[in-house]
Amino acid sequence: MSHIDLALVLPALLACVLGGLLKGATGAGAPVIGVPVLAALTDVQFAVAVFVTSNLLTNVNQAWQHRKARLPWQFMVLFAGGGALGAMGGTVLLAGLPSDTLSIAMALVVLGYVGFRILKADWMLSYAAGVRLAGPIGLLGGALQGATGISAPASITFLNALKLPRSTFIATISVFFIVMSIGQIEQLVTVGLLDWHRFFLGLGVTVAIALFMPVGNYLARHLAKETFDKIMLGLLTLIATKILVQELFF
């Protein structure tokens, strides 16, 4: 393994440790923290390609565990199908736009997510409204995932607004990530951003995330949810700010 490879493995491990903590605590969101950490030290294309494998594999297990709690198929098809289509289109942007433009876009997406979580924490949607919005929100979330590696500002915020039980939330978001990741992987291979080297790094990321998910579960049980949310949102703000300062002023 080359010196460059080692330099990339270490930040990847840091990124997936933090991502595993978040996923273990909330049932979703490993890329929300992992992709910006890795992108801040490498680039957005690399970070998205490395995390896509773990996004698929870690959610297969969750979807199976919570399969009895999923929402009706009408909602699932619209939401996950929109996600897959959006991810394929977003990946074209990922391959075609300059790295600095993608970094700035990702940082703004993260800050927008943090701001929305703070200002609209009590936002609610009825299930009927959720069904009508499932396709468009899925499409938007997939496009964000494909272009920046982070669908949370659309997907997770949308499901949180439906006030779903924890098990139903996990089942729904897991199926969304699985279907979306399949479309994203196919497109990443097509545009040349996902090769065997990044795939195997992604498998390593998957193992590391899985190892730290129980730690996240433990922290979620022993920390107030509000405290854990504030820590993660604060960390995301610092990471996004670092990326913006780095890209705009250096």
Image (tube, rainbow, N blue to C red):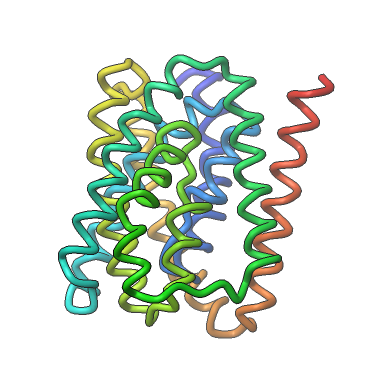
Q: Which of 33 and 97 is in front in this view?
A: 97
Vertical position of residue 171 compared to residue 84: above or below: below
From the top left corner, tell me how far across and down residue 177 is, in percent.
Answer: 32, 52
Q: Which of 94 and 234 is in front in this view?
A: 94
Taking the spot 66% from the left edge, 30% from the top edge, the residue there is 104
Q: Is 161 left or right of 191, judged from the image as shown?
A: right
- Examine the image and state in which quarter residue 242 appears: top right
From the top left corner, tell me how far across and down residue 9 is, in percent.
Answer: 51, 34
Taking the spot 32% from the left edge, 41% from the top edge, the residue there is 53
Vertical position of residue 180 compared to residue 128: above or below: above
Numbered circles on residues, count: 0
Q: Which quarter of the rendered picture does the N terminus lie within?
A: top left
Q: Outermost residue, right direction? A: 249
From the top left corner, tell me how far across and down residue 159 is, in percent.
Answer: 42, 66
From the top left corner, tell me how far across and down residue 145 is, in percent.
Answer: 43, 40
Q: Which quarter of the rendered picture does the C terminus lie within?
A: top right
Taking the spot 69% from the left edge, 76% from the top edge, the residue there is 227
Q: Nearer the viewer, residue 181 or 80?
A: 80
Q: Is 225 left or right of 60, judged from the image as shown?
A: right
- Examine the image and state in which quarter residue 167 appears: bottom left
